[in-house]
Image: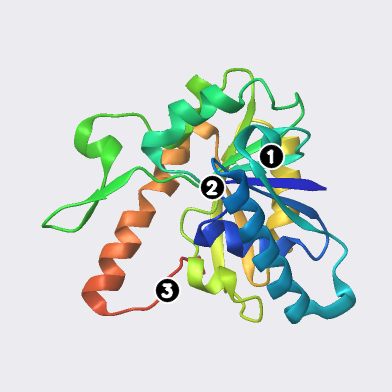
Amino acid sequence: MKISIIGGTGGMGEGFALRWVVNHDITIGSRDAQKAASSAEQYMNTALASYGNNIKGTIRGADYISSSRDSDILILSIPYDSVKLTCESISGSIKKDCIIVSPIVPMERNDAGFTYIPFEKNMKSAAQLLAENLPDKNIVSAFHTISEVKLKNVNESLDSDTFVCGDDQQSITKLNQLIEEIKGLRPLYLGPLSLSYQAELLTPMLLNASKKNKIKHPGIKLT
């Protein structure tokens, strides 16, 4: 499977690349193709040191447009305020059957703590905004509450759940299979894409709770 991660030079992108390169070809997408190539080389060296010869996939770097082309799974690990501009640049490159995955969380920090922007400012959820800017594309949301630090540590189990929202069951099934390749991560279907806000708002809640109670790298698990 070909997986592209736009915004892949960040911590989440690194974690996804290291977890999935065992079985899949990964493209790290950045506005700066050279930066993407440098990050991809670093990730690949880390993966080789971790897995040895058990790697079936590769990691390469590319610009946004090139990385979105021919992808089976396209993860948009980008800031909320970059959604519209990014969608404008890649919309013509995404193939019809590509699954677009949103781990995007619209949040900001004030004196009280982290807050969820759509509730505070009467704005759209990240999933809603993506759907408006990528009409007729297949969008699924996931990965809002997983620890970036744990994700990058390939020897560690996440021991967490991630909520998945989407309107196409076949795409959800395909993404769930990919999620289950990450050690200790369980996908839980939350509902249609319109309910994605329920998963997104959990991120600022987790950050507030972890800061106030001195909990490192928290996650969510239903029992």
Against 8, is 78 above or below?
above
Mark 2, secondary structure of its residue: loop
> Does residue 79 appear in this view?
yes
Cα–Cα span, label 1 and label 3: 30 Å
Q: Position of residue 4 (x, y in %)?
A: 68, 45
Callout 1 amino acid:
Ser
Lower sequence index among marks 2 and 1: 2
Q: Report the residue at 58% width, 56% height from top.
A: 13
The answer to whether residue 53 is left or right of residue 221 is right
Lower sequence index among marks 1 and 3: 1
Name the one closer to the observer, 43 or 147: 43
Name the one closer to the observer, 46 or 81: 46
The answer to whether residue 87 is left or right of residue 171 is left
What numbered label is drawn on residue 119? none
Callout 3 amino acid:
His
Q: Report the residue at 76% width, 36% height from top.
A: 170
Mark 3, secondary structure of its residue: loop
Q: Residues within 10 Å of mark 2 (few under 14, many from 20)?
A: many
Q: Which residue is mark 2?
A: 7
What numbered label is drawn on residue 217? 3
Callout 2 amino acid:
Gly
Dividing the picture into quadrants, the one containing residue 14 is bottom right
Residue furthest to the front in view is 34
What numbered label is drawn on residue 67? 1
Lower sequence index among marks 2 and 3: 2
Q: Position of residue 127 (x, y in %)?
A: 48, 34
Against 125, is 155 above or below?
below
Task: Tell me the mark number nearer the camera, choosing from 2 and 3.
Answer: 2
Q: Position of residue 9 (x, y in %)?
A: 55, 55
Dividing the picture into quadrants, the one containing residue 44 is bottom right
Against 116, is 159 above or below?
below
Against 101, is 10 above or below?
below
